[in-house]
Amino acid sequence: MGNLLKVLTCTDLEQGPNFFLDFENAQPTESEKEIYNQVNVVLKDAEGILEDLQSYRGAGHEIREAIQHPTDERLQEKAWGAVVPLVGKLKKFYEFSQRLEAALRGLLGALTSTPYSPTQHLEREQALAKQFAEILHFTLRFDELKMTNPAIQNDFSYYRRTLSRMRINNVPAEGENEVNNELANRMSLFYAEATPMLKTLSDATTKFVSENKNLPIENTTDCLSTMASVCRVMLETPVDPPVLDHPNLPQMVNVQPDISGGFSKACCAVREREYRSRFTNEQTVSFCLRVMVGVIILYDHVHPVGAFAKTSKIDMKGCIKVLKDQPPNSVEGLLNALRYLAFERGITVSANSSFLENSG
């Protein structure tokens, strides 16, 4: 009987946690509501932030005109007038990153606390796990949009240069009170990052671990690795369809509990197909993919040896295979994020490329 249970739960194959995270419908229980409501106040503004960023066009034309005609006061005023409201938007984005950081740390506190294990937390507190996933999904979407919009850094650099010149010349500047020098320095560091929102969350996770010394680091890393494993299992393409469709599958389970290899693999595939069939929204697949990559990156920043080490609890080859099984154009940005992560860990470019390209 024990072997049968192992077959059905795939523990021998180390397929990962055997539960479904309901990213579409999870609702908070009474014990989750306090943290859930706090985080929800932040998340309700996330879509508006993404819409503002997506529609951000910049003041490139006005800035070029002003630089090419430095003595034309009309063009200088026009460029300044175009940049100031845009800097107000950039300030809003930056301030939202600080709110998101606080929300993430609140969720980490709830999902890593004793006496429950991280797996138990994620299974019991699915609404909080869903919010954690939504933060990661937002983060990767924000950074994807930021990376493809050079106007953001150009606008902010022009703003700072012009403001500095105005101060030297004792010229009163409209908008100076909007972003003081200290805030401008912090915003400058934020937007200098290729992936500023992800860097904010990575730093927040690292800080959470360092500030909670009474909490084993494994509580945090296991929470992240479990989330990655759950996403991978829910996304994996079923294998061995002829075995799955075998008309005597129920009898095979009852009569041959000790059968090994292919049958165990087939039972895991049954579970994976059943998990994925629960998705009612086609966008849930891309949501899960982003979340999986997001938690891998956070894990890599927090874990002493990173996500690519042999001792890592994340099945990196399995996760990458899931990505490679998707339509290529839909996941190239996520694969590039993992390539860059491997490069940061000192994996050579050729080894990194081989690992990511030949994982299937």
Image (cartoon, grey):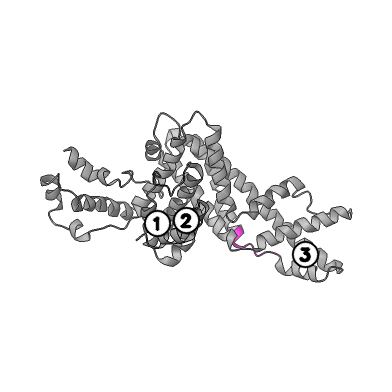
**Sequence-earlier tag: 2 or 3:** 3
Residue closest to the eye, 204 or 278:
204
Residue pictured at 41% horizontal, 38% vertical? 125
Q: Amino acid under label 1?
A: Ile
Examine the structure image and report whether residue 258 is included in the region drawn in magenta.
no
Residue closest to the eye, 10 or 86:
10
Q: Amino acid under label 2?
A: Leu
How far apart are the two marked residues, 1 and 3, measured between alpha carbons? 46 Å
Range of the magenta residues?
53-59
Judge whether residue 22 can be spotted in this image.
Answer: no
Q: Amino acid under label 3?
A: Ala
Q: Position of residue 80 (x, y in %)?
A: 78, 61
Residue closest to the eye, 85 or 273:
273
**Is the C-beta separation of discs 2 and 1 under 8 Å?**
yes
Q: Which residue is mark 1?
A: 320
Q: Which quadrant does the N terminus fall into?
A: top left
Quarter of the figure with residue 174? bottom right
Residue pictured at 19% horizontal, 37% vertical? 2
- Please tell me the numbered disc located at residue 79: 3
**Sequence-earlier tag: 1 or 3:** 3
Please tell me whether mark 1 sits on a helix, a strand or a loop: helix
How far apart are the two marked residues, 2 and 1, measured between alpha carbons? 9 Å
How far apart are the two marked residues, 2 and 3, measured between alpha carbons? 39 Å
Q: Position of residue 154 (x, y in %)?
A: 70, 62
- Disc 1 packing (10 Å; few <14; some 14–19; many ≥20): many
Q: Position of residue 288 (x, y in %)?
A: 42, 53
Quarter of the figure with residue 69? bottom right
Q: Which residue is mark 2?
A: 338
